[in-house]
Image (cartoon, rainbow, N blue to C red):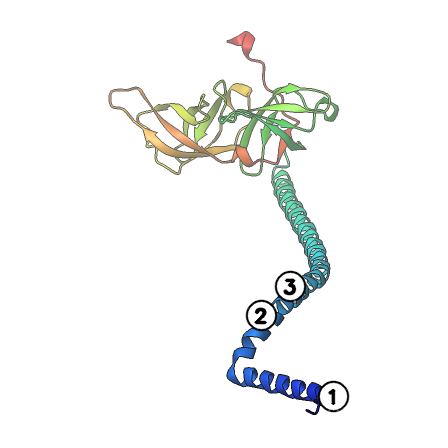
Amino acid sequence: MRKINFRNWKKVVLVLFVLGIAFFALSGYMNKVIDRIMGPVVNVHSTLMERLNFVINLFTVSQSEVELVAENQELKNQVAELQNYIIQLQQNLNEADILYALLGFARSSPDEQYIPAKVIGKDPSPFLKYLLIDQGSDMGIRSGMPVVTNNGLVGRIDAVTASAARIKLITDSTSMINAVVVDVDAECMVQGSITGDITIEMVSQDVNLEPGQIVQTSGLGGDFPSDFIIGQVLNVNQINNEIFQSASILPAEDFSSLQAVLVVSNFSPANTTPLE
């Protein structure tokens, strides 16, 4: 018997192997083998690419975010500066308006001499009774001097230091002012209260009091000059069989928002204590 050549045998085996693989591939069995072999490789490759992309994005996005945050903060700082500038301008305009109004009032009353002062402190209680101003005895301010604005009477000085003074407002419970209801030419007494409200008292029942009537200082008693506006009648309290009637007053000035005042420096209250 003739022996089979070894090389021929290898060719036969190789052809059979190729034909086998082709058979498995065409029949679909090869896909499962490829999936089992290549699946883990693909998964590892995908994982590595995801990690690589994450690292790249981390540095790229972080840098962008840092730049955006810095730019945003800079814009916020600019907006804050502009807002502060606008607020300062508004305050300067408000102060200028107040000073112009006080100046106009002072010019309209040439018989009086005024010392302008800035309000630097207020009564912390809800019932405002006093204010502090930044002018004192060094500027010639003395106790008892009346304090006004272009709107009307504020009160009078009741305590003084070299550089500051305290104003007792007309709303103080110890404040009493001789006044007159201008529209009906009726004398009355303006009285403060613990609650900060002011009223007119001691008005004859024959007087026809009505809301809106103007009340101003009469000059009687020597505590205040005449003709300074105090306020206007708000509500009338008239009781039958009473000798007098009274009424609440709406002050001419809003004391809670005062920023500047005028001190009447050429008026000295009359000392009537020995005569009473």
Q: Do the residues labelled 2 and 3 touch (CB within 8 Å)?
A: no
| Residue at horizontal 49 percent and vertical 36 percent from the top | 252
Q: Where is residue 76 in the image (x, y as percent from the top left)?
A: 67, 53
Judge whether residue 197 can be spotted in this image. Answer: yes
Q: Mark 1 points at which residue?
A: 7
Quadrant in the rendering for residue 101: top right
With respect to residue 41, does 181 lie above or below? above
Which mark is first along the chain, 3 or 1? Answer: 1
With respect to residue 196, does 75 lie above or below? below
Quadrant in the rendering for residue 154: top right
Cα separation between marks 1 and 3: 46 Å
Type of the residue with mark 1: Arg
**Which dot, 2 or 1, sits closer to the camera?**
1
Q: Name the residue under label 2.
A: 36
Type of the residue with mark 3: Thr
Type of the residue with mark 2: Arg
Q: Which of 83 and 98 is in front in this view?
A: 83
Residue at the extreme top: 274
Which mark is first along the chain, 1 or 2? Answer: 1
Q: Are marks 1 and 3 in contact (CB under 8 Å)?
A: no
Cα separation between marks 2 and 3: 17 Å
Say left or right for 140 vs 181.
right
Q: Mark 3 points at which residue?
A: 47
Mark linked to residue 29: none
| Residue at horizontal 54 percent and vertical 74 percent from the top | 32
Mark 3 burial class by Cα count in 10 Å: few <14, some 14-19, many 20+: few
Q: Nearer the viewer, residue 75 or 276?
A: 75
Q: Which of 157 and 78 is in front in this view?
A: 78
Q: Nearer the viewer, residue 117 or 195?
A: 195
Mark 2 burial class by Cα count in 10 Å: few <14, some 14-19, many 20+: few
Kind of element beneath mark 2: helix
Judge whether residue 112 can be spotted in this image. Answer: no
